[in-house]
Every structure is written in C-alpha cells, then in structure tokens.
Amino acid sequence: MLRVGITGGIGSGKTTVAQIFSLLGVPVYNADHSARRLMNSDKNIREAIVKLFGQESYKGTELNRSFITSKVLENEKNRALINAIVHPATIADAENWMKQQKAPYALKEAAILFESGAEKNLDFVIGVYAPEALRIRRTIKRDGRSEAEVKKWMSRQMNEDEKMKLCDFVIYNDGNHSVIDQVLSLHKKLLNLAARQSAPPEKE
Ligand code: ATP
C-alpha cells in the first residue's frame, strides 16, 4: 500500500481536498485531530504538557485549547517544545493506523509534514496550494479569528512556495482550477502507482 501525505498551510484547503479523496474511498488520517485526541487521552503527553505550561493546560480531562494556542503563539520556543511532545506520538499513531489500512493507498493529512520529519515515512506528498490572501479570508470566515491572529499562525509555518516545491504533486485550490478534476486525475495516477508497487517483478 502506498502512503501518501497531504499538506498545505493554514486555510489552504487540505481537509476539503482530503474529504474528496475520502469520498472516492481513500482512507484518510487527520494528524491534527489525532494530535488533539492524544493530548486528551495519552497520560505521558498530558503529564509532559502540564509540566511545561502548568495545570491551566487542562480543564478537567479536556485540553484547554485556547490556553495552549495562546502559549504556542507567545513565542517560537513554546511552539517547538510542545511539538517535541506531540509530534513523535502522532507520527507513531499514524504509522500504526497506516499498517491497518487495506486500500491501494492511504492519505495522511497534516499541516506540518516536512517540518516534523513525518514525510520520511511517506511514499509521496501532495501539496494543496491557495494564495495567501485567499487562505486568510477562508480561515477568518471558518474560525472567526482576527486577521492578525491568522497572520501570526502563518508566520510560524513554513513558507508556502518552499513547501510546494518539496511536494510530489500540487493541487491548486485557488478558485481558478477545478479541484474535483485535479483530485480525480491524481487519484487515477496514485492507483496506477500503487498497482505498479504491488505487481510482482517481471521475469527476465
Ligand atoms: P487548517 O490547516 O487551518 O486546518 P485546511 O488547509 O484544512 O486548514 P480547510 O479547512 O479545508 O483548510 O479550508 C479552509 C476553509 O476554506 C474551510 O472553511 C473550507 O470550507 C473553505 N474552502 C476550502 N476550499 C474551498 C474552495 N475551493 N472554495 C470555497 N471554500 C473553500
């Protein structure tokens, strides 16, 4: 089975594009959702976060997301420290999930793939691209966050052009290209690549 990553900056449309693949029957792992689940359920992660940011990190058994977000946005060091706690566990969880999939290929959706080194476990990476101004507009509309906050998140992520250069395929979600057509064409390509991967070697 092929392991394929799907990435892109905040508001690029990763989840939207991944949902189309999912409708085509492709299993999708969402790293962001899994990281949140692990922060709530994994005792070691919980203890490490409380040690780092204090008791306010949790409200009862639930992660105090607004508090953690404010800590992450406070400075680069905090972001790196929490990533060092959460990323290895999420990468391991995704690996486990991948092993259980039975499809020709499966997708791992993550905003941070290259930055966390997670791409090393993947055969291909798809980038979802949208221009910055559109990403800001879509994120403000979706989350009700301020423009300043969205821009702050963006400044903490890898440069989008650099990220797309590292991807094997790019889907343009910029309002000028049909996303459905691009997904259908890429789906076909990935099925072919998966079939080639699982074919027995030709006899000489
Ligand atoms: P994040 O990294 O913040 O989770 P994301 O890359 O997963 O973001 P989405 O949540 O898929 O991005 O998209 C951001 C917002 O933009 C959503 O509200 C989504 O419905 C909207 N959106 C995405 N693509 C399009 C599109 N082609 N046309 C209109 N709206 C779109």
Image: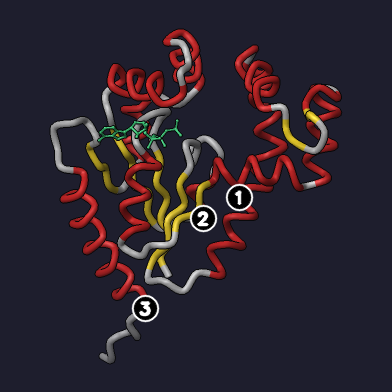
Whether the residue under disc 3 has CB within 8 Å of ligand 1? no
Query: Mark 3: which amino acid?
Result: Ser
Whether the residue under disc 2 has CB within 8 Å of ligand 1? no
For label 3, the residue is 198
Circle 3 crowding by C-alpha within 10 Å: few under 14, some 14–19, many from 20: few
Circle 2 crowding by C-alpha within 10 Å: few under 14, some 14–19, many from 20: some
Image x and y of residue 60, in percent: 82, 33
Find out whether the residues at labels 2 and 3 contact each other: C-beta distance under 8 Å: no
Image x and y of residue 181, in percent: 16, 50
Image x and y of residue 51, in percent: 86, 28
Task: In the rendered structure, find residue 91 and report the number of the disc placed on it.
Answer: 1
Residue at mark 2 to residue at mark 3: CA–CA distance? 18 Å
Q: How many marks?
A: 3
Q: Residue at x 20, y 49 (%)?
A: 180
Lower sequence index among marks 1 and 2:
1
Q: Look at the image and name its color scheme.
A: secondary structure
Label 1 SS: helix
Query: Mark 2: which amino acid?
Result: Asn
Task: In the rendered structure, find residue 46 and report the number of the disc placed on it.
Answer: none
Q: Residue at x 42, y 28 (%)?
A: 10
Residue closer to the observer: 103 or 55: 55
Tell me if residue 192 comes above or below residue 46 in the rendering.
below
Image x and y of residue 143, in percent: 46, 24
Quadrant in which the C terminus appears: bottom left
For label 2, the residue is 121
Residue 129 appears left or right of 43: left
Label 2 SS: helix
Residue at mark 1 to residue at mark 2: CA–CA distance? 9 Å
Label 3 SS: helix
In the image, farthest residue toward the top: 148
Circle 1 crowding by C-alpha within 10 Å: few under 14, some 14–19, many from 20: many
Find out whether the residues at labels 1 and 2 contact each other: C-beta distance under 8 Å: yes
